[in-house]
Amino acid sequence: MKKNLLIITCLFVLFSCTKNNNTNVPTNEDQKKSNDLSITAKAGADSLNKNDTTKKARNKSINDVSCAYSQSYSTSHWSPSYYTVIGNFPAAGAPSNIVPKGTWQAGPYAFNNQGDGNLVVYVHATGKVLWNSETFPKTTRLELQNDLNMVLYTASGPVFESQTYIFKCGTKNPRNTMLVLTVDGELCIIADGINGNGSLATVTLGGTRTFGGVVTPNNASFFKLYTTHPQDGGISFAY
């Protein structure tokens, strides 16, 4: 009797341990479901809120810059034949200029403010995409603001910005600030600057880094090169 009871007790303990171990170790199918759920959660996350958080952190450091000088400029004033003007930035305090939906071409390159909400720089003949804002599919409005920022808005708020407001100096805006597409394939924001000899120069506030038809390393953002110290190679704006 004692022997039988001992056997029953051992079997009960063994069964309990086996059951507990099985509940703690997921099957391959459970692991697959877990992975799928993880991927779905990432894909369904509110990317705009995540980007906004990143932008706020980035803006905090950029906002410490006051009256920045550009380190990206031509030693001469660009000829109007070198670029196609997409839009002009307003004077300080004036309402934003709205860039209409449509396509602009300069040389073999094109820029499209698309109906699906995406901003795209591409090779006109082939359609090869060089840069895009990654803002589709959305209903958007592209504004050139009086703070020198280019912002793409939806009904719920901004989804893309050039962050070129760092070049604003108090209430002053650089003269002739424009959004242009060059015949070398770069979408950029330019303005008038002054060389050391007093002659006009073209100053770049930001661009897509698609010069020469290169596929950009910075999709969904504008590259900016600035300094607060003109002696480090910066050039001042003309106001």
Image (cartoon, rainbow, N blue to C red):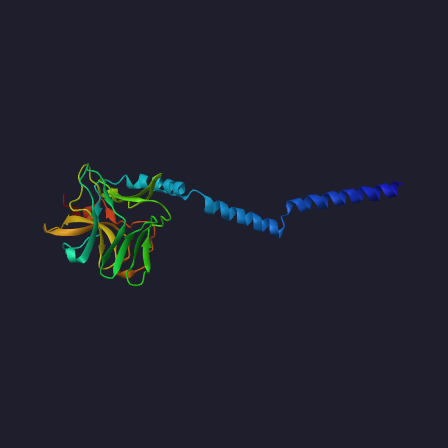
Residue furthest left in the image: 198
Q: Please tell me which residue lies in front, 33 or 111.
A: 111
Relative to residue 217, is residue 22 drawn left or right? right
- Where does the image place residue 148, in percent across and percent down from the top left? 23, 43
How many marks the image carries: the answer is: 0
Residue 210 pos. (x, y %): 28, 57
As rendered, which of 207 and 145 lies closer to the eye? 145
Q: Is residue 36 left or right of residue 46?
A: right
Residue farthest right in this picture = 1
User: Which quarter of the picture shows residue 157?
Assistant: top left
Residue positioned 20% across, 54% down in the render = 84
Quarter placement of the N terminus = top right
Residue at the far bottom in the pictured view: 125
226 and 33: which is toward the camera:
33
- On the rendered structure, is 110 left or right of 38? left
Q: At which x and y percent is residue 55? A: 34, 42
Residue located 26% across and 57% down the image: 110
Instruction: Tell me what residue is drawn at x 45 percent, y 43 percent.
Output: 45
On screen, residue 207 above or below 54: below
Residue 195 vs residue 231, the one in the foreground: 195
Q: Position of residue 189 (x, y in %)?
A: 23, 49
Q: Quadrant of the C terminus?
A: top left
